[in-house]
Image (tube, rainbow, N blue to C red):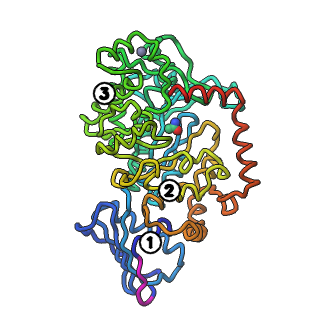
């Protein structure tokens, strides 16, 4: 079973198919906690509400898959180590249909993941119908072609989710205890937004929706008040669609060249008593964050947003790279919270030969560089898939599964998860789950590629990029 339950004790006898299943609400249990008691006379599922009961039913379903007609009698008591167990799909670089997303969501629910981080805006596309600013979906969702790395197509690429489709996804997730966490990345990764509303950038000159991978120069201008008015209106429009507690506002990979050269941004730095453009990013994030907090939402940012040293402690930080100048540690020491999503462990856009299933399963709840005692600051973890180089659903699925299941167990069991080999055994035994939902999961021989296979996969992945792409990415990274 995946994730493995916290406590499981076999008792006498078996329960056949005809044994009735009874569900009972038990107010004393935690929100996601559940209990199962299987006896020859009855199968009793207990939870304090819908989430717990859903998990009890899910576990029972996995038991039936494993044991067939006659279930051994047993008692299970189970609850997660972490409240935030998330999977991310980038629908900006490539669009995946509502049905394709539902398939991924249903599969994730089977492993008790409970947040769907939906990356809906980036340089290469804005993907949600927007009432307040319709040019976002009319212009921002269309690009003239795909020039991702060595891949070259001059065919128009487009797609966005209508508001009804968004509501459908949110409702669908809700049926399985999953909250949708939308991400509007800012102040960088906004080229598609700027293609629709160029007046929001420092230069104010027209740009096209991005066709290449990488880090783009144009940012929202943090000096002009109009930018903040736009973002707040946009957030109002999006909050209508997304009722959940968390809202991701990006903050990664924002090179500061434009801000350094912009008179409005420089004026802002002076007037707000900031030291430099790095602090301006903290200021920018804090303003958006306080707007969301006032609406009762919790903002999340990528770790670069912490580097200015002035990020409000209420903003949750999603860790994916490094702790520059101990700024992340300082944020957590102030009482800030973190979500773990380290590239080396959690990024499924890389082939297994670069980030194996074992790497995902080995995600540390306490990253060494942050020192002892951050465990209470960790809300949970996330597995991710960026889709610059993923153009179809089958490839998406084979990259994500079963690695997403490994993260699910990390999040559910935390430090007390069994050894990796034990996980693999259970994974093999439950592989029919992927077949049940029609998911193209990577089979056992692909989980830990040997040296030669890993080298081949790495070389193939690197072929996505030209030498110039790599050089440009390196330069851009230095300026973030
Ligand atoms: C990221 O991978 N740019 C967060
Ligand atoms: Zn500016």
Q: Which mark is residue 165?
A: none
Measure the alpha-carbon separation of dots 3 and 1: 46 Å
Measure the alpha-carbon separation of dots 3 and 2: 32 Å
Picture layout, residue 244 above or below residue 234: below
Name the secondary structure under disc 1. helix
Q: Is mark 1 within 8 Å of ligand 1?
A: no
Residue 452 left/right relative to 48: right
Measure the alpha-carbon separation of dots 2 and 1: 21 Å
Return the x and y of residue 337 as percentages of the image width and height: 34, 46
Return the x and y of residue 435 as percentages of the image width and height: 60, 62
Q: What residue do we see at 38% from left, 11% from top?
A: 264
Picture layout, residue 284 above or below residue 70: above
Residue annotated with mark 2? 407
Q: Earlier in the sequence, mark 2 or mark 1?
A: 1
Residue annotated with mark 1? 60
Q: Nearer the viewer, mark 2 or mark 1?
A: 2
Residue annotated with mark 3? 287
Residue 465 left/right relative to 376: right
Asked whether the beta carbons under mark 3 and mark 2 sit within 8 Å of each other, the answer is no
Work out whether residue 107 can be spotted.
Answer: no
Return the x and y of residue 111 as percentages of the image width and height: 48, 60
Q: Give the magenta-colored segment's residue range.
A: 8-13
Q: Is mark 2 within 8 Å of ligand 1?
A: no
Task: Specify few, some or many for label 3: CA neighbours under 10 Å numbering under 14, 14-19, or 20 or more.
Answer: some
């Amino acid at each position: 079973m995946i994730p493995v339950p916290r406590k499981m004790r076999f008792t006498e006898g078996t329960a056949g198919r005809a044994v009735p299943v009874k569900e009972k609400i038990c107010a004393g249990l935690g929100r996601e906690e559940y209990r199962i008691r299987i006896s020859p006379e009855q199968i009793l599922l207990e939870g304090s509400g819908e989430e717990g009961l859903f998990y009890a039913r899910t576990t029972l379903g996995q038991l039936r898959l494993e044991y067939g007609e006659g279930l051994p009698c047993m008692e299970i008591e189970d609850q997660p180590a972490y409240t935030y167990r998330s999977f991310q799909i980038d629908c900006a670089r490539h669009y995946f249909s509502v049905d394709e997303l539902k398939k991924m969501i249903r599969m994730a629910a089977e492993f008790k993941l409970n947040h769907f981080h939906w990356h809906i805006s980036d340089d290469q596309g804005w993907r949600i119908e927007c009432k307040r600013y319709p040019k976002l979906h009319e212009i921002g969702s269309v690009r003239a072609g795909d020039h991702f790395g060595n891949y070259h197509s001059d065919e128009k690429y487009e797609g966005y989710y209508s508001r009804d489709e968004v509501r459908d996804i949110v409702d669908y997730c809700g049926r399985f205890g999953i909250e949708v966490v939308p991400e509007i990345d800012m102040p960088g990764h906004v080229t598609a937004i700027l293609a629709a509303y160029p007046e929001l950038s420092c230069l104010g000159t027209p740009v096209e929706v991005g066709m290449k991978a990488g880090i783009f120069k144009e940012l929202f201008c943090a000096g002009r008040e109009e930018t903040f008015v736009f973002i707040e209106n946009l957030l109002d429009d999006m909050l209508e669609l997304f009722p959940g507690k968390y809202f991701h506002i990006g903050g990664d990979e924002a090179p500061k060249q434009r801000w350094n050269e912009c008179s409005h941004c420089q004026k802002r730095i002076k007037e707000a008593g900031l030291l430099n453009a790095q602090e301006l990013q903290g200021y920018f994030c804090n303003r958006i964050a306080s707007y969301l907090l006032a609406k009762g939402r919790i903002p999340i940012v990528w770790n670069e947003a912490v580097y200015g040293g002035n990020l409000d402690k209420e903003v949750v930080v999603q860790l994916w790279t490094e702790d520059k100048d101990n700024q992340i540690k300082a944020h957590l020491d102030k009482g800030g919270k973190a979500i773990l999503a380290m590239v080396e462990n959690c990024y499924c856009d890389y082939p297994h030969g670069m980030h194996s299933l074992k790497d995902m399963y080995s995600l540390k709840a306490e990253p060494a560089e942050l020192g002892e005692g951050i465990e209470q600051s960790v809300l949970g973890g996330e597995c991710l898939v960026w889709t610059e180089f993923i153009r179809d659903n089958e490839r998406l699925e084979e990259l994500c599964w079963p690695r997403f299941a490994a993260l699910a167990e990390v999040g559910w069991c935390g430090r007390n998860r069994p050894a990796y080999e034990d996980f693999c055994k259970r994974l093999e035994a439950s592989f029919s789950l992927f077949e049940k939902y029609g998911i193209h999961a990577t089979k056992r021989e692909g989980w830990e590629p040997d040296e030669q296979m890993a080298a081949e996969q790495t070389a193939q992945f690197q072929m996505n990029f030209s030498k110039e792409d790599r050089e440009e990415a390196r330069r851009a990274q230095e300026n973030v």
